[in-house]
Amino acid sequence: MPSESNNNLGVVQPKDFVFKSEEGFALESGAILPELCVRYETYGSFKNGASPVVWICSPLTMDAHAAGLHEEGNPKTIGWWDALIGPGKPINTDYFFVVCSNTLGGCKGTTGPVSIDPRTGEPYGSKFPHITICDMVNAQKKLADYLGITIISMVIGGSVGGFQALTWALEYPDFVKRCAVIASGTKLSAQALGFEIVGRSIILDDEKNGLANARKMAHITYLSAESMRNRFDSAEHLPSDPEKFYTGFALENYLNHQGEKFMERFDANSYLHLTWALDNFSLEKKYGSLENAVSRLKSEFLCVHLSSDWLFAPDESKKLAWALLNQKKIVSSVELDTNLGHDGFLLEVNDMGNLLSRFLDPQAVDSPDEKYVHFAFGSKKNINRIFDFIPANSSVLDIGCGNGHLLHILWREKQIAGFGLDRSFNSVLHCLNYDVPVIQSDLNKDGLSQIADNSFDFVIFNRTLQETQNPRDVLLEILRIGKQAIVTFPNFGNWLVRKTLLLKGRMPKSKYLPYEWYNTPNIHLSTLLDFTTLCEEEGISIKSMEFANSNIFSKLLTKLGLKNLGAEQVIAVIEKHST
Amino acid sequence: MPSESNNNLGVVQPKDFVFKSEEGFALESGAILPELCVRYETYGSFKNGASPVVWICSPLTMDAHAAGLHEEGNPKTIGWWDALIGPGKPINTDYFFVVCSNTLGGCKGTTGPVSIDPRTGEPYGSKFPHITICDMVNAQKKLADYLGITIISMVIGGSVGGFQALTWALEYPDFVKRCAVIASGTKLSAQALGFEIVGRSIILDDEKNGLANARKMAHITYLSAESMRNRFDSAEHLPSDPEKFYTGFALENYLNHQGEKFMERFDANSYLHLTWALDNFSLEKKYGSLENAVSRLKSEFLCVHLSSDWLFAPDESKKLAWALLNQKKIVSSVELDTNLGHDGFLLEVNDMGNLLSRFLDPQAVDSPDEKYVHFAFGSKKNINRIFDFIPANSSVLDIGCGNGHLLHILWREKQIAGFGLDRSFNSVLHCLNYDVPVIQSDLNKDGLSQIADNSFDFVIFNRTLQETQNPRDVLLEILRIGKQAIVTFPNFGNWLVRKTLLLKGRMPKSKYLPYEWYNTPNIHLSTLLDFTTLCEEEGISIKSMEFANSNIFSKLLTKLGLKNLGAEQVIAVIEKHST
């Protein structure tokens, strides 16, 4: 849906907002900037305050030019997130008023080291005071106030922009309805921090070429090993020049070009100050702990991670989503499958657009293609019984939540605090359509260890048990994080199953077991009796048990008390033995 | 078993070998070194040529001091691979004569930029000619000749030392019996190359501190994200000094220390020349293709990869092992599970020692603990029938080979060219004990796509089908790489299975199905009829079928022709329909 050339914004003009007051603009460090200039662009119309606002936080070395063109007909002047912002695009400027500003400390119009210090009439240069991510956001807040904005529908940022978006939500919790944090986290990893530290050393030790070399190094961290291999492994190379230690590899030319371009467009002092700010960003340090930080938050969150991002590796970045979930904050989290590395946050605009349009306005988006609905086998009967079972106002985690329909109706009808977990990206899209918070997570890979004990009144485990790699461990885990669990599974002891195997000598297929033996996701099937035996062994109480049967003999056998023979589908409510 | 302090080598002395001749020492580039000095150490006694020789190739910036002490009682002077080399250690100096030399182009005694050019009486400095990995090995060969060595039992190297070891085997194929390539590959990845290129720019642009900064950057690439997080995330930090952009983080102090130490011990010109040599190393480039290069090889290979190594990522490094396997060269390959990153090749000495002692001398090592033998359920009957089936002198791949026993007896009795594939590290140890070449690989993760079409006369797939995630695809794959396949699996249609399910209503357990439903690795069970039906659908011919039955009724039913009811275990020989 994004990036059609016929619906872009056309030429846009940056504007400057200058904040002057007697006290000046105070930084977190206590230092004062006598004057603050913020360069910004806006897309769409504010309609005198009637339009909802989307606020874009720019990444490390980007400017305020997120969308549109700076020069008619010149595609080289296109904004860095143009595919996402414009009329009819995921951040739809027909509806939203969109603002993006250049970062404090940068060198693209907003006050920074290249700006003139009004006290001396000279550029600040190396005397520019040290700034923090919070200072950047406070400067943006001044701009928002100036523009007459009283609430932001969504603040969004990628990479260091994500630090800013998060800081918006932390510092101005009532001002920010939604917060989208893309390819970012709660602080830099030690590895990323290491590269930053070395980068600054290179710049400080070599005034002439340090900035170019630091950028070349940083640039490698923005790519993935795979994307570099694809691009450079079989690329032509020029004759080498051993005298100058020049290899002639296409990769060397590419990196040199990146370094040179950056020298032309960026200021070394800006780079030092911006990286200093991001290196010192840490929710843990500032608020005592991640939990303390998260407890302040009131916005709804969307966290997007990129599978091949090693600057903000998904595992590290996901910690924010888990911390939000543990405090029942509204959060959805998704990992985009990409080989583009960290740069994917600027390039994976199709998936990101699909997520953002749903996050911004669930109702506005058509239901996604039903062909993706691998969970369609969760029968209506199950869902109805589970629905009946859950009391109003309880907290619920639905593992393998699929399209989120059950959580949606539980939320609507019973005001539950409900969260979904599913491994599929398309399930996340469905859930966002239903306005159901969902964490994309693969139980078999990621487990549930990030979720705190007794987090939920109910854990729903609908037709997923037999698909897990370790059903026993999973049962114990869901009773660690939930006070009770509702588990449903197909009964391999059902007479139809036995009959198929007995008489036909084939692995059974049925309404509840619709797969071939060689492609079934049901890798740990059990009979009702197997299940109850395991529960007994593991100290799990079965509070109640119901059966969903479609066959008349199944129903009859169940009625006669021959449950293991009769049950086609088991719906069990379990809890730990009180000790 | 390694690194007991009471059996170390004590104080060792480096020696210098000087090669002088009228023609000088010719480099690959055509340049001539008028004089070549190689500094080296030896461990153990050569016994006048009676001892077998192990040749150690040193990594990028290491010296000849691989083992022992340089100063009595001073543990700081210990060699860099001391845990592996010494009396009673994995590379046992009671038996082996071990040689390690400093690399050509280095700065630790062997000719390099800091050496005096006899033609000028001045150090070579920046005028030192460019060298290649092959030049390094040629210099080592001169030393070997001087020492009277006529054959090397094993050449081993980690990281860039691995490039040298591989080059030994390529350039002197009849001189090298075994070759161990540790945490290395056939060339640098584009990502690693990128960091090298940037490192040289930093050094060339900043004579004063460039070497330190380049080393700091490189040092990060030697660690893993996880090991850095573990070490630095919660480390104390000193007060920062914003004026100097000094964060005070323990990580910054650590990196600065690494940079300073390196400046003291290393020469910038050496570093430039050594990295130049490794950046330009590429089997693909030098020999036209990896296949061409591998076709020259005659040594037995052991390739060791480290799971968290991103400088030589396992996937990339494994390509050498697959290329060797595809040409039926004797190769074993293993991936050590470590979070230490590339540095693991200096630190994971226990696992490496276990591998090396077996690779060097299978008979000398006791059979490993049988508790590791998860494959013990592969019944003797199966193995005997498979053994009978395979004609002498054929080529065989055993997928899920376990301890390698079958391949071992096939090799011994029928002179087959046999290779194993198994996912477990302990299986690799067992196989090395049996002197059976084995590739550590997880079928479900890695697949078989790296193996060429029709590589083997027979693929053995003994009791593994039901453990795979996609049995159908796997069947098609094994008939792509093998002309025929021998597949064995438990028959879920057996009357005992049916009876258990029918009468007990429990998931069946038996001799052939010994697991609980919740922990069984048998995730895709099938009946004999399911299997034959699938074969028919996929154009697979069943050439013959036998059954391994322990129960008397099973035997009877099978005899009566009720195979799907009778068979407990199926042994089928399959091939593709000729088209």
Image (tube, coloured by chain):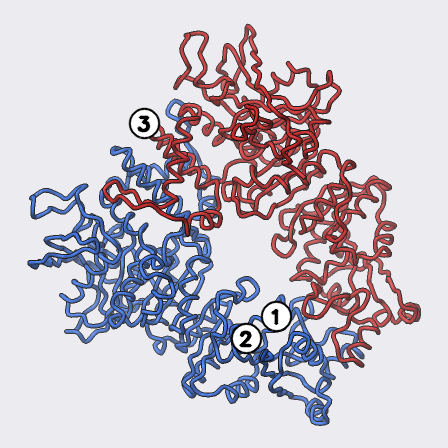
Chain colours: A blue, B red
Residue sitting at x 61%, y 32%: B293
Which residue is denoted by mark 1 in the rendering?
A467
Is residue B460 shown above or below A387? above
Q: Is residue A460 left or right of residue A294?
A: right
Is residue A350 shown above or below A371? above
Spatial CA span between label 1 and label 3: 60 Å
Q: Which amino acid type corresponds to the residue marked 1 in the rendered image? A: Glu
Residue sitting at x 56%, y 39%: B347
Q: Secondary structure at mark 2?
A: loop
Q: Which chain does tag 3 point to?
A: B
Q: Nearer the viewer, residue A352 or B15?
A: B15
Spatial CA span between label 2 and label 3: 63 Å
Q: Nearer the viewer, residue B537 or B266?
A: B266
Which one is closest to the eye, mark 1 or mark 2? Answer: 1
Q: Secondary structure at mark 1?
A: helix
Q: Which chain does tag 1 point to?
A: A
Residue sitting at x 29%, y 65%: A170
Tell me if mark 2 has few (under 14), some (14-19) or many (20+) residues whose alpha carbon lies within 10 angstroms of its own.
Answer: some
Residue sitting at x 44%, y 71%: A438
Q: Is residue A510 left or right of residue A189?
A: right
Chain-order first, disc 1 or disc 2:
2
Q: Which amino acid type corresponds to the residue marked 2 in the rendered image? A: Phe
Q: Are marks 2 and 3 in contact (CB under 8 Å)?
A: no
Q: Mark on residue A375?
A: 2
Q: Mark on residue A188?
A: none
Q: Mark on residue B208?
A: 3
Query: Which residue appears farthest toward the top when viewing the image?
Result: B22
Q: Nearer the viewer, residue B82 or A245?
A: B82
Q: Which amino acid type corresponds to the residue marked 3 in the rendered image? A: Lys
Is residue A30 shown above or below B167? below
Q: Quadrant of the N terminus of chain A?
A: bottom left
Which one is closest to the eye, mark 2 or mark 3? Answer: 3
